[in-house]
Image (spheres, rainbow, N blue to C red):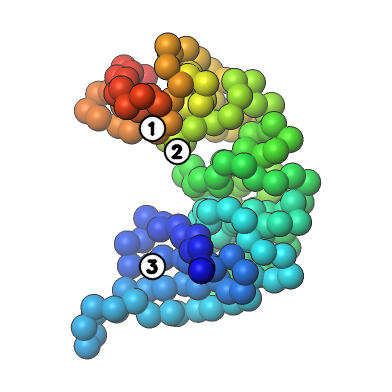
Amino acid sequence: MVTWRQHQSGDASHVVLSDGQESIYLLSLQDDPQPRLFAEHEAPVGAWPLTTRLAVLGNLVGCGAENGKLALFKLPSLEPQPPLDIKAQITWGPFPVGEHALCATDTDELLCIDAEGQLAWKTPLAHGAPAGRPLLLKDQIALLWKEGSYSQLNLNDGQESSHIDFDHPVIAGPVPWGENLVVTAFDGTLLLLAHP
């Protein structure tokens, strides 16, 4: 069985997929003669299997690899780029945040990777493991913590600018809803936060 790792960028006509073991693909939506997916580019993943989701950051796509590095591929060619040695396994992410990507590691660190595939900053996981998907709010990253809290981090340096504790562990969000953010608690309760 193949486990596909995918990322859809803001470009709805392209998707990047990988089987994690052999190849990475850039697929495009073709309309002629009928709607279908077409493999524009294909490249080998390299010597080390990919172990995480894919994230587009700038003109690169990144993915955690079994060797403790962030594998990087140039878009659109998927030409392999020098990997970023993060010296850890990614346990959450990477998730795109603007032109950056955010991930957590088994060394209890939160990493921000810039559009050049370099480490922009790292910070300890002060509130435990992250949950859900990060959300970019101007120059702030909205982030949930599994044990039941919400933080906003500065995109430029990872410094926490605000923090809220909940009475419930959380699993999903934050998601914009009007002037608010919605967070899903472990028991299915929807928590509403005033949008900062």
- Horizontal and vertical percent position of residue 93: 55, 45
Nearer the observer, 117 or 66 = 66
- Horizontal and vertical percent position of residue 45: 64, 70
Secondary element under disc 2, as helix, strand or loop, is: strand
Under mark 2, the amino acid is Arg
Instruction: Give the CA distance from mark 1 to mark 2.
Output: 6 Å
Sequence-wise first label, 1 or 2: 2
Under mark 3, the amino acid is His
Residue 67 as seen in the image, left or right of residue 34: right
Which mark's residue is nearer the viewer, 3 or 2?
A: 2
Kindly identify which numbered label has been placed on residue 14: 3
How crowded is the residue under tag 3: few (<14 C-alpha within 10 Å), some, or many (20+)?
many
Q: Residue at x 45, y 35 (%)?
A: 132
Residue 32 figure quarter: bottom left
- Horizontal and vertical percent position of residue 170: 43, 25
Q: Quadrant of the C terminus?
A: top left
Q: Residue at x 38, y 32 (%)?
A: 173
How crowded is the residue under tag 2: few (<14 C-alpha within 10 Å), some, or many (20+)?
many
Kindly identify which residue carries mark 2. Answer: 133
Q: Residue at x 68, y 33 (%)?
A: 109
Nearer the observer, 137 or 123 = 123
Q: Is residue 39 above or below residue 135?
A: below
Residue 195 figure quarter: top left
Disc 1 + disc 2, Cβ < 8 Å:
yes
Disc 1 + disc 3, Cβ < 8 Å:
no
Which residue is outermost to the front? Answer: 1
Kindly identify which residue carries mark 1. Answer: 173
**Residue 68 visible in the displayed image:** yes
**Residue 159 visible in the displayed image:** no
